[in-house]
Image (cartoon, helix red, strand yellow):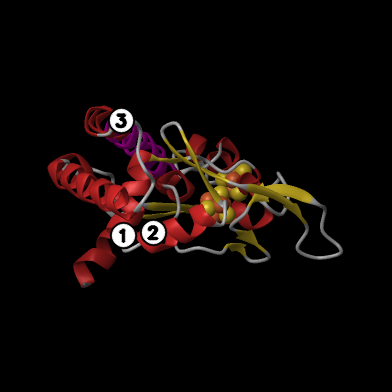
Amino acid sequence: MIRLDIQGAHTQLCSTLCAKCPQGPAGCCKAPPHMDWSDVGRVVAHDGRDFLLTRIAKKDLLPREGGLELRRVKRREAPTEPMERKCVFHGAGGCTIAPTMRPATCNYFLCEDTFIEGGERKGERSAVLARQAHGALRAVYERWDAALSARIAETFPEGPAWDAAFLDWLGEAFVRLEAASGTELSALPVSDENRQAVEER
Ligand code: SF4
Ligand code: SF4
């Protein structure tokens, strides 16, 4: 079953299949996504600047072209579990960091198996809406990344310093992009469950 928690750029799509992932205990966290410019800006906008600076210093987050790479580590969480190479932030109970500190892909990505299990082919509404939300979010984030890449190249021709001043600048640039995309984000499909929750707020 798929559950949608539509919150614009911070949307989370969840599947019950992830708890018994066919890929093993770490699921798709074996291949963490990159933290692209838009992700870094989004984390800063959620008061995550110091989190990023600390994790960059610890080399858990590695500067790369286009943002940061999440370090992979080899470990097992229990003697009965297989040794896996996986995201440094993955622990025994799943992801150990808040959704606001993760790449957006971690929050809205679902693999094909989850859509099958969620009944997309039978027209199950939550699965159909999740597919739409997934596509819309990917398009928005790709556009934001292209816009931020261009602005970074223009403003920091020598490359970013990965210091507090750069991260603050990126956080503000993200907030402006998000505000300018209001209509696009508010057009994300909303499940009945989600709509009811919003109406009750
Ligand atoms: S999205 Fe798919 S691959 Fe990733 S944890 Fe869930 S079931 Fe596993
Ligand atoms: S940040 Fe969390 S959700 Fe994303 S890959 Fe790492 S452990 Fe998985």
Spatial CA distance of label 2 from label 3 is 21 Å
**Residue drawn at x 17%, y 41% as measured from the top left:** 181
Tag nearer the camera, 2 or 3 = 3
Label 3 near ligand 2 (CB < 8 Å): no
**Residue 174, image x, y percentages:** 24, 46
Return the mark for residue 131: none
Kind of residue at disc 1: Asn
Is 155 displayed left or right of 100 in the figure? left
Please state the horizontal and vertical placement of residue 99, each as a whole percent of the image.
Answer: 43, 59
Residue 51 spot, x, y in % from top left: 43, 62
Mark 1 lies on a secondary structure that is helix
- Is the residue marked by circle 1 packed among few (<14), some (14-19), or many (20+) residues within 10 Å? some
- State the extent of the magenta-drawn residues as a range: 127-144
Give the image quarter of residue 157: top left
Are the residues at dot 2 and dot 3 in contact (C-beta closer than 8 Å)? Answer: no
Q: Identity of the amino acid at label 2?
A: Thr
Question: Which residue occupies the extreme front position in the image?
Answer: 158
Per the picture, the main secondary structure of the magenta-coloured stretch is helix
| Residue topped by disc 2 | 100
Q: Earlier in the sequence, mark 3 or mark 1?
A: 3
Residue located beneath label 1 in the image: 194
The residue that disc 3 covers is: 149
Residue 145 seen from this side: yes
